[in-house]
Every structure is written in C-alpha cells, then in structure tokens.
Amino acid sequence: MTALLWLIPAALFLGALGLAAFFWSVRSGQYEDLDGAAERILLNDEGPIVDEEDEAGKKRGG
C-alpha cells in the first residue's frame, strides 16, 4: 500500500511533465511545417556520396 503513495504522485507528475512538453512544442512552432519535411526528401541538393575506400580501390585496379 505504501508503494501506491509513491507511484500515483510519480505517475501524475510524469504525465503533467509530458503534457507540458507537448504544449511547449506546439507553442514554439514544432508542428508548423508538416509538408516541408515530406517535400524535402524529394530534393537532391547534394551530389552522390562517394566512399574514399571505393575510390582507392578503383585507382588500384580492384
């Protein structure tokens, strides 16, 4: 029974902490641009990634 005296307030505190973190993220604009991340994956701004080890193997002939 004494365990419930610790567990119930701890659960309420962690729930309130999670709710406060959610409200903070909404208020700070974390969910503003939901389409940007979905479209950003379609853009190819960088060239192909070349592994240095593969380049050295090509120069040596295999």
Image (cartoon, helix red, strand yellow):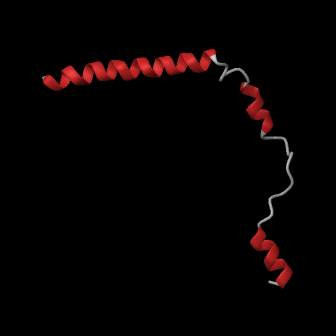
Q: Is residue 52 above or below residue 12?
A: below
Residue in view at x 86 percent, y 45 percent: 45
Q: Quadrant of residue 55?
A: bottom right
In the rendered view of the protein, which quadrant contains the N terminus?
top left
34 versus 46 height, above or below = above
Side of 2 where 29 appears, left or right: right
Q: Is residue 13 left or right of residue 62?
A: left
Foreground residue among 31 and 56: 56
Query: x and y percent of residue 41 in the render?
Result: 77, 40
Q: Residue at x 84, y 57 (%)?
A: 48
Dividing the picture into quarters, in which one does residue 37 lie?
top right
Residue 44 percent coordinates (x, y): 85, 46
Residue 49 is left or right of residue 12, and the answer is: right
Residue farthest to the bottom, as pictured: 61
Please give the count of numbered marks on the rendered protein: 0
Which residue is drawn at the image coordinates 26% and 20% (left, top)? 8
Which corner quadrant holds the C terminus? Answer: bottom right
Residue 16: horizontal and vertical position, in percent? 41, 17
Residue found farthest to the left: 1
Q: Is residue 9 left or right of residue 50?
A: left
Residue at (87%, 54%) from the top-left corner? 47
Residue 25 location, x and y as percent?
59, 21
Question: Where 19 sits versus 43, above or below?
Answer: above
Where residue 9 sits, quadrant-wise, is top left
